[in-house]
Amino acid sequence: MSLETTFKRRSLPLDRPFTISRGTTTETEIVTVEIVDEDGTVGLGAAAPASHYGETAATVEAVLPDLLEVVEDVGDPHQLARIERRMRERVNRNPSARTAVSTALHDLVTKRLEIPLYRYWGLDPAETLETSFTIGLDDTETMREKTEAAVDAGYGTLKVKLGTDRDVEIVRAIRETAPDARLFVDANEAWTPREAVETIDRLAEFDLAFVEQPVPAENPDGLRFVYERSPVPIAADESCVTVADIPRIADRCDVANLKLMKCGGLREARRMIHAARAHGLEVMLGCMLESNASIAPACHLAPTLDYADLDGALLLADDPAEGVGTPDGRIDLDALDRPGTGAVLE
């Protein structure tokens, strides 16, 4: 079989500046990948690199020729395990670049089979859930206004960024604005272990589902310190990158937060989900600031999750791709009327 491959770098402005404890972003760069078979069927994927994990759009562009050469050499998109192994041998890092190729291959394979991706995995589209909508850091009144807009738009699950000297004030304002929302908060490594315990003790009254990544990933003992003292469940994000991290965090948190752009592909994400379950952890799938070109494949994992934080495309001013519908925040796999991941470039 003959396969042709191409990729394209794209700059996508955000709807409004997005701030977390590490800084503010006004645009995101992605790299879309297309793999075309001899019948003209196109598989679409995308990388959304994060500098926090050592990647940029430029590094993705630099390694994609090597990764796509592997795809062309193998020639059969159905040999996903062989391609994944050879890509990792060729490029051990750059997980978002490998994810772009992985998702394009899965999209192509399931389009050739004329089935949606969730069916390829044997999943029930009715066993889905809603994605959270993220409230980025801002002054407290603006965060209250963002919350009101999200609730009015139908989102019943909210994720709130923290890591300031007014975290309790922020969460109080958001809980007052959204008294019925399922609420979790994310410090993005901003607290010391003792600060985390003190802050979480004060936040516990606001009925939080969990607190995400309270301390830096390079302080695993600090994560355990917080976990053992927290009245609220703890989720690990930056501490949970690949399947090898699951055993390391199993006695330090309640929830493993996976991201396709961290782990390197859809097959690795599924391995992480199984490993997390085996270690008694709940599972969330998160995202970066991404296009539907990469959010769509993530949505197909919804039946295997406890939580979804797949709102990256919702924060863009304009997205070059359509994806899986999320009416009122619910990931609606059942309504998907096309094969593959559901992602299409407009």
Image: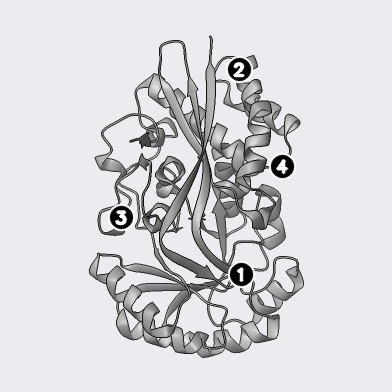
Amino acid at circle 2 = Glu
Q: Nearer the viewer, mark 3 or mark 4?
A: 4
In the picture, measured across the screen, residue 210 lies left or right of residue 218, that is left
Labels 4 and 1: the sequence-earlier one: 1
Task: Write the residue at 69% across / 70% down.
Answer: 216
Residue on which disc 3 sits: 330
Where 145 falls versus 317 (above or below)? below
Residue on which disc 4 sits: 93
How much space separates mark 3 and mark 1, taking CA atoms? 29 Å
Within 10 Å of the Cα at label 3, are there few (<14), some (14-19), or many (20+) other Cα atoms? Answer: some
> Which mark, residue 72?
2
How much space separates mark 3 and mark 4, taking CA atoms? 33 Å
Query: Which corner quadrant holds the C terminus?
Result: top left
Task: Write the residue at 41% across / 46% down.
Answer: 299
How much space separates mark 1 and mark 2, taking CA atoms? 39 Å
Amino acid at circle 3 = Arg
Task: Write the residue at 70% across / 73% down.
Answer: 224
Task: Write the residue at 56% across / 82% down.
Answer: 164
Q: Is residue 143 visible?
A: yes
Q: Nearer the viewer, mark 4 or mark 1?
A: 1
Amino acid at circle 4 = Arg
Where 223 falls versus 335 (above or below)? below
How much space separates mark 4 and mark 1, taking CA atoms? 23 Å
Labels 3 and 2: the sequence-earlier one: 2
Q: Give residue 311's quadrant in the image.
A: bottom left
Labels 3 and 4: the sequence-earlier one: 4
